[in-house]
Image (tube, rainbow, N blue to C red):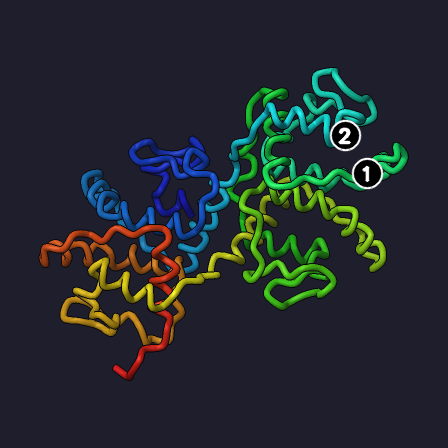
């Protein structure tokens, strides 16, 4: 979608693409939210439109589905690079007992592989996949050595990965994972049997936590790997009790699965309608659309249309109608309203709230 719609003419993602506009991948903040992506698009839209006109770039149309796919891709792309403390990771490598079985550069145990030689375990998703796939064998070894299963909290797994990455050197492997596809991830979730124990917003099993929008996911992908590692023995026992074969992940399957889990949370809006209405006035949206967003002389009714507005539908509406809105705001001597990331949930809550009275 990114290439099909011509975005790559100006933008790169993780180094691949154009140079006329900012790289939208891991050089950007690693812990992006969908709100951040949409507010960045909103705030920079006039500049993008001007650049496209100057470069004589055609203006592509986006359906709501296409816009959702585009943001899924960008959302996943920003999660492939997360900083960690390699010096603390080296300490954890010893403290957590990894050194008893694994070596790095020849220093350490010989039971497991030398982690400097492993490829391509150098990104959070590859790391999560390798940790999951090899956890049963590691657990068996650790029982033989009478070692407790180590758990990782907060940023510890990220620090450990930073240490392995620093020692390993060599080229990084992010591009092999992208684009991750949430729809393929939903297929992976069902095919691998996850749905037998986990539900997604009430649909699925009840033996394990519901992974839908009501449950917060870890802030980073390496923390996802840490959580999967921490619960691996418990999950493995539950699978054996149910007669479920432990799934093995390969190629892009873990990337697609994680993209799906994060995509479930795209429409978990939160926000206060009262704050949203206040922001609607403060950002001067009410000058065109009226204080209740029921329509004005210069703008249409934004409420009472029977539609649930989300970050993605807002982005799609911006792209479809934004140039006309921008021209109208200039005619009225209104500046283009700048949005903060924290504004979006409140504004959408206001637009989705039932109008006080029929219009």
The answer, for residue 251, to whether it is visible in the render is yes
Labelled pair 1, 2 in contact (Cβ < 8 Å)? yes
Residue plotted at (43% across, 59% down):
65
| Residue under numbered circle 1 | 148
Real-space Cα separation, disc 1 to disc 2, in angstroms: 9 Å
| Quarter placement of the C terminus | bottom left
Element carrying mark 2: loop
Residue 281's x, y, as percent?
A: 23, 63
| Quarter occupied by residue 348 | bottom left
- In this image, 100 relative to 48: left or right? right
Residue 276's x, y, as percent?
A: 32, 64
Residue plotted at (87% across, 38% down):
143
| Residue under numbered circle 2 | 97
User: In terms of depth relative to the viewer, which is nearer, 233 or 117?
Assistant: 233
User: In terms of depth relative to the viewer, which is nearer, 144 or 171?
Assistant: 144
As displayed, is residue 308 above or below residue 173?
below
Label 2 environment density (alpha carbons within 10 Å; few <14, some 14–19, many ≥20): some
Label 1 environment density (alpha carbons within 10 Å; few <14, some 14–19, many ≥20): few
Seen as rendered, the residue at the extreme bottom is 358
């Amino acid at each position: 979608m990114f290439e099909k719609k011509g975005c790559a003419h100006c933008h790169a993602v993780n180094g691949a693409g154009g140079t006329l506009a900012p790289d939208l991948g891991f050089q950007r903040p690693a812990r992006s939210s969908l709100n951040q992506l949409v507010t960045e698009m909103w705030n920079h839209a006039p500049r993008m439109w001007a650049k496209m006109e100057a470069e004589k770039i055609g203006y592509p149309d986006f359906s709501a589905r296409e816009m959702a796919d585009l943001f899924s891709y960008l959302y996943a792309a920003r999660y492939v690079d997360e900083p960690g403390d390699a010096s603390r990771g080296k300490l954890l490598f010893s403290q957590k007992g990894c050194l008893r079985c694994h070596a790095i550069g020849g220093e350490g145990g010989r039971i497991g592989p030398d982690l400097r030689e492993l490829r391509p375990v150098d990104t959070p998703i590859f790391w999560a996949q390798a940790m999951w796939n090899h956890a049963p064998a590691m657990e068996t070894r650790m029982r033989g050595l009478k070692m407790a299963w180590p758990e990782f909290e907060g940023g510890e797994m990220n620090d450990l990965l930073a240490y392995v990455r620093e020692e390993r050197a060599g080229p990084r492997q992010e591009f092999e994972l992208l684009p991750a596809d949430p729809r393929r991830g939903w297929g992976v979730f069902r095919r691998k049997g996850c749905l037998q124990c986990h539900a997604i917003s009430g649909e699925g099993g009840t033996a394990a936590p519901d992974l839908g929008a009501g449950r917060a996911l870890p802030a980073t992908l390496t923390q996802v790997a840490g959580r999967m590692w921490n619960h691996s023995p418990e999950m493995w026992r539950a699978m054996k009790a149910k007669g479920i074969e432990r799934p093995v992940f390969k190629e892009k399957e873990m990337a697609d699965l994680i993209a799906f889990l994060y995509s479930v949370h795209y429409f978990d809006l939160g926000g206060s309608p009262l704050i949203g209405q206040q922001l609607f006035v403060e950002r001067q949206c009410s000058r065109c659309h009226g204080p209740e967003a029921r329509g004005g002389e210069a703008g249409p009714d934004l409420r009472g249309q029977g539609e649930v507005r989300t970050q993605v539908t807002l982005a799609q509406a911006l792209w479809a109608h934004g140039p006309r809105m921008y021209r109208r705001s200039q005619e009225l001597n209104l500046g283009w309203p700048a949005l903060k990331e924290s504004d979006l949930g409140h504004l959408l809550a206001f637009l989705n709230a039932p109008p006080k009275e029929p219009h």
